[in-house]
Image: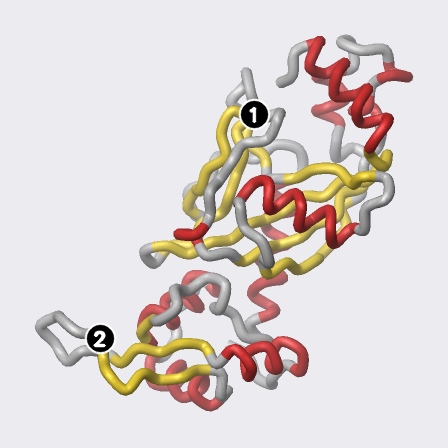
Amino acid sequence: MLTKKELEEFCENARENYLAHISIDCVVFGFHEGLMKVLVLELKNGGEWYLPGGFLLKKEPIEEAANRILKERTGLDEIFLQQFHVFGDPERSKEHFDAYKDMVPAKDNWFTNRFLTIGYYALVDFCETNPAADQFSALCSWCDLNDLPELKLDHALILKTALDTLRLQLNYQPIGYNLMPKQFTMPELQKLYETILDKKLDRRNFQRRMLGFGILNRSEQPRKGGAHKAPYLYSFDLENYEAALKEGFKGGW
């Protein structure tokens, strides 16, 4: 929670620079050691948790604002970013209203505005991110998808909607280029899909379908090491992958 002085300074800056009544909230997914990760922020002086987000500059396109916000939180450029929903419940910001209503007169208090928030989800390489807190937060960190702290406002709903949208995307678009390392095994890719879908997939059917999409290249050499037969390494065929993102493919999991 901001101090009175911090709130006054932010509200003055916000009135001058930011578009009123619209915000952006982002669900940032990563994948590491077989687990789906989500980037979250811990608020200063309160221990409350939120998704990364921010506001739009008055002359700034929405997509540019989302990319700017995520670059500030992750340190990454050219993030895979998908707008998925607008959240506009009139009471969605009530906790902020109640927390700050007595600190600054209502006419000067940016947080007394009703905000519609535009939801984006991002797929990033876990190992390439450099999580950084914003001016309201003490910490920006990764948490396991199945072991998240309680999220404030409607951020649990935003996260659930993003995950539902990501699962739906798996039915008609590829997933993985932004989440997997440059080379990976078929079992590692299957684990990613199973983690997102929260269900087991048949190994043979998964491999047959993934190869049938034409978006993978197989290395001539298998991965070295291990007591058992070494699995082959794969990488994404970026040209075919991007075509599949645009054109889609049929079928579901």
Screen quadrant of the N terminus = top right
Rendered position, 250 above or below 223? below
Q: Residue at x 59, y 77 (%)?
A: 242
Q: Amino acid at mark 1?
A: Leu
Rendered position, 55 above or below 82? above
Q: Residues within 10 Å of mark 1 (few under 14, many from 20)?
A: many
Evaluate if marks 1 and 2 touch, with contact meaning CB atoms under 8 Å apart: no
Q: Position of residue 90 (x, y in %)?
A: 83, 36
Q: Residue at x 52, y 38 (%)?
A: 40
Q: Residue at x 76, y 43 (%)?
A: 117
Residue 66 is left or right of residue 201, and the answer is right
Q: Position of residue 189 (x, y in %)?
A: 38, 71
Rendered position, 7 above or below 114? above
Q: From mark 1 to mark 2, how far is it between C-alphas?
A: 43 Å
Q: Position of residue 68 (x, y in %)?
A: 67, 45
Q: Position of residue 233 (x, y in %)?
A: 30, 77
Q: Which residue is mark 2?
A: 223
Residue 98 is left or right of residue 148, and the answer is right
Q: Secondary structure at mark 1?
A: strand
Q: Residue at x 75, y 30 (%)?
A: 93
Q: Amino acid at mark 2?
A: Arg
Kindly identify which numbered label has been placed on residue 43. Answer: 1
Q: Nearer the viewer, mark 1 or mark 2?
A: 2
Q: Quadrant of residue 3?
A: top right
